[in-house]
Amino acid sequence: MSTTDEQGIRSCVSCGINIAGTNAARFKCPDCGKQIYRCAKCRKQSNLYECPDCGFTGP
């Protein structure tokens, strides 16, 4: 699952929802440095995420 589509819409890497206008987190993958976006709900629930570039997983 991509964190952005062709129009540059950002989505949560865990659940895929559009994060525009939400209290989302933006951070770089600890392994490869790719920008990752997560929605507040997935962060609060500690849902796992996977980097779409290198496959790194985290809570």
Image: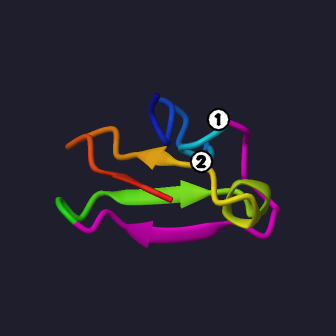
- The quarter of the picture where residue 22 lies is bottom right
**Looking at the image, residue 27 lies above or below residue 54:** below
Which type of secondary structure does the marked residue at label 1 adopt? Answer: loop
Which type of secondary structure does the marked residue at label 2 adopt? Answer: loop
Instruction: Give the left or right position of residue 20, taking residue 5 as reference.
Output: right
Instruction: Give the left or right position of residue 34, taking residue 5 as reference.
Output: left
**Looking at the image, residue 7 lies above or below residue 46:** above
Instruction: Give the left or right position of residue 9, taking residue 39 as reference.
Output: left
**Looking at the image, residue 31 lies above or below residue 50:** below
Of 31 and 17, nearer the camera is 31
Instruction: Give the left or right position of residue 22, taking residue 33 as reference.
Output: right
Q: Residue at x 78, y 70 (%)?
A: 23
Q: Residue 41: horizontal and vertical position, in percent?
A: 79, 57
Q: Any mark on residue 7, and which?
A: none
Q: Residue at x 49, y 42 (%)?
A: 3
Q: Which residue is mark 2?
A: 10
Q: Amino acid at mark 2?
A: Arg
Which stretch did the figure color magenta?
Answer: 16-30
Q: Which residue is mark 1?
A: 16
Figure coloring: rainbow
Answer whether labels 1 and 2 touch (C-beta < 8 Å): no
Q: Amino acid at mark 1?
A: Gly
Q: Residue 40: horizontal and vertical position, in percent?
A: 76, 63
